[in-house]
Image: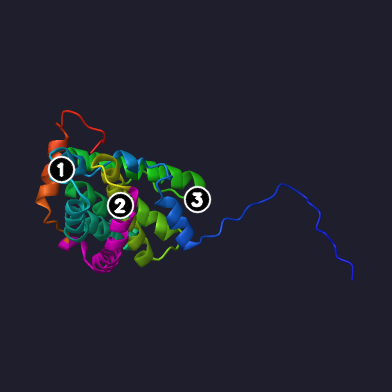
Amino acid sequence: MATTTPRNTGPSITIMSTDAVLTLTQWLSPGFPVGAFAYSHGLETEITAGRINSAQTLEEWLRDIIAFGGGRADVVILSEAYGAEQSELSAVEHTARAFAASAERLLETEQQGDAFARTVDAIWDTDLGALTYPVAVARAAKAQDIPLDLTARMYLHAFAANLISAAVRLVPLGQTAGQALLADLAPLIRDTASCAVETPLDALASSCFAADIAAMQHETLYSKVFRT
């Protein structure tokens, strides 16, 4: 039976289908141009002071940050932004900015959010505009119909992975030890994300005061590698 090959009658059109896992992997990978590698979330202060000097001390710090600090808070904000109507988004965005405990924390979330939104807008034809990082990721995921629970888990995993990457360079910590720690943190990341997406914005809180102080002290650190 003869087959007919369709003629090329014009320019080819590439239809971008959304695969949630692949899209989130791209957005939250170290290669996505948000400059995440340049930020340590105050971790550099603790390493310089010698308070974090091993995989064990790093793990203790990260477990608190993930479960009770900036990691969990970001997911609460992300979840609220994901479900917000456009008219409600401004309030979520203002809360995200107000919750930044220092000038460098605000810089971190603003610059990463702006870079993320500009890249996603250019490639996925969205109109996110300038947003803080968790809000930008949430709105991009909502626009692409990516599930909230998956977005939350992968966002928090990327958050932890970036801090481990900073410690690998500064402690120094071996690559294998860093990856082992990230694997050990997976259950906590999963459980924290699941809890955070069910937490309303008016219950947003953090009890990691040492991390906030470390971020503030980083502003005047004499010699530093990271921007926060």
Query: In the figure, is residue 126 to the left or right of 52?
Result: right
| Colour theme | rainbow
Q: Tell me the residue that label 2 is attached to.
A: 178
Instruction: Answer whether residue 98 is magenta in the image.
Output: no
At x 14% / y 58%, what residue is drawn?
Answer: 205
Q: Earlier in the sequence, mark 2 or mark 1?
A: 1
Quarter of the figure that contains the C terminus? top left
Q: Tell me the residue that label 3 is attached to.
A: 124
Q: Tell me the residue that label 1 is attached to.
A: 46
At x 21% / y 55%, what residue is drawn?
Answer: 59
Task: Note whether residue 109 is visible.
Answer: no
Q: Earlier in the sequence, mark 3 or mark 1?
A: 1
Q: Earlier in the sequence, mark 3 or mark 2?
A: 3
Q: Is residue 22 shown above or below 110?
A: below
Instruction: Answer whether residue 192 is magenta in the image.
Output: yes
Q: Dots 3 and 2: beta carbons under 8 Å?
A: no
Q: Amino acid at mark 1?
A: Glu
Instruction: Identify the magenta region.
Output: 175-203
Instruction: Say which of 16 and 54 sits in front.
Output: 54
Q: Position of residue 220 (x, y in %)?
A: 14, 31
Q: Amino acid at mark 3?
A: Trp
